[in-house]
Amino acid sequence: MDLKLLEDLAALARCGSFVKAAEERHVTHPAFGRRIRALEDWAGLPLVTRGRPPVRLTAQGRELLEQSSPLLEGLLHLRQGWRDLHGTDQEGAGLLRIGTGRTLARTLVADWLGRLRSTIRGARVQIHTRAMAEISAAFERGEVDFLICYEHPALSNPLTGQRFRHVTLANDRLMPVARVDAAGRVRHSLFDPEWIGYAPSLTLGRLLNDHLGATRPGQQPPPAILCDSADAVLELAIKGLGMAWLPHSLASAAVKAGLLKVLGGRGDQIHFEVRLYRHRARQSGLIEAAWDMSNR
């Protein structure tokens, strides 16, 4: 039996959804369904319920997962230890696995990798982008080497203590912006009811909701448009569909080009860190070299 099938079952148990579990496992929904069917064919009986969501494991599915999890975890840990020791992937090339969010991958992570270019030359880089809670859990399980994430008191990041080390890669800020028309007029004000918000599942949404709750309790109307992508928020703001709070690292080019104007003052901006986390234990030479370069 392919061990990946057990990992698929564990993902389905966590997500409670074939679609979400397929996304986590980076396969299509139909392919993921076929893999679960293959595991059930091996077991000879149903392992999951197929009715109304959420998807749940049957008693046999739970038993299989309980019995196999220690073995699977041990084998994955053994395999990762071998790879960490030699700093290689399956093909023998140096491998650097980075977990982060989609917005950070486009902006500050790209800048960081540019600074590391000479240090990681010849290595293969994998960038995994998921919801921050999911990618943080993957980092804690050792499935990625570095975690790059936002840090702010409103986020309550649990990555502390003796297991991890971190360094601040950059300081960024959410700033309120609005489209500037051809005559130089700003289309929306800071308190305009036409504004674009983030889905609560996004880290930026949590930052913004905390800020609005502290500075405008009960005063801010709900957003006219709600997005689960900062890139989409940027495009909507540029098209003049509402004011928005955008990371400086993402919106600065549009501001410099005169497409967007920053609204309000310093108190209307939300400052936060971007941190790089690693496991405290000694890692491969490639990971240690990237860490040392990031500390300069």
Image (cartoon, rainbow, N blue to C red):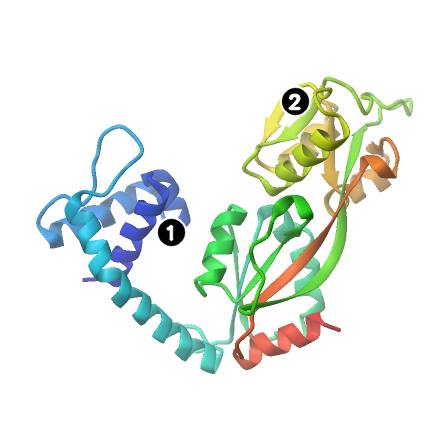
Could you tell me how far apart the alpha carbons at marks 2 and 1 are, in whole angstroms?
32 Å
- Residue 248's label in the rendered image is none
Q: In the rendered structure, which amino acid carries the disc numbered 1?
A: Arg
Q: Is residue 138 left or right of residue 211?
A: left
Q: Residue at x 71, y 61 (%)?
A: 169
Q: Is residue 95 left or right of residue 233?
A: left
Q: Is residue 151 left or right of residue 10?
A: right
Q: Which residue is mark 1?
A: 25
Q: Which residue is mark 2?
A: 223
Give the percent coordinates (x, y) of residue 207. Answer: 67, 39
Compared with residue 86, is residue 194 higher up or lower down, i.e. above or below?
above
Q: Residue at x 76, y 49 (%)?
A: 172
Secondary structure category for the residue under label 1: loop
Give the percent coordinates (x, y) of residue 244. Answer: 73, 30
Compared with residue 75, is residue 59 higher up or lower down, i.e. above or below?
above
Q: Quadrant of the N terminus?
A: bottom left
As rendered, which of 176 and 27 lies closer to the eye? 176
Secondary structure category for the residue under label 2: loop
Give the percent coordinates (x, y) of residue 158. Answer: 56, 55
Report crowding for label 1: few under 14, some 14 to 19, many 20 or more residues within 10 A (C-alpha).
some
Q: Is residue 282 left or right of residue 113?
A: left
Q: Quadrant of the C terminus?
A: bottom right
Residue projecting furthest to the left? 44
Q: Is residue 122 visible?
A: no
Quadrant of the rendered structure where residue 186 is?
Answer: top right
Q: Residue at x 60, y 49 (%)?
A: 156
Compared with residue 105, is residue 113 higher up or lower down, i.e. above or below?
below
Q: In the rendered structure, which amino acid carries the disc numbered 2?
A: Pro
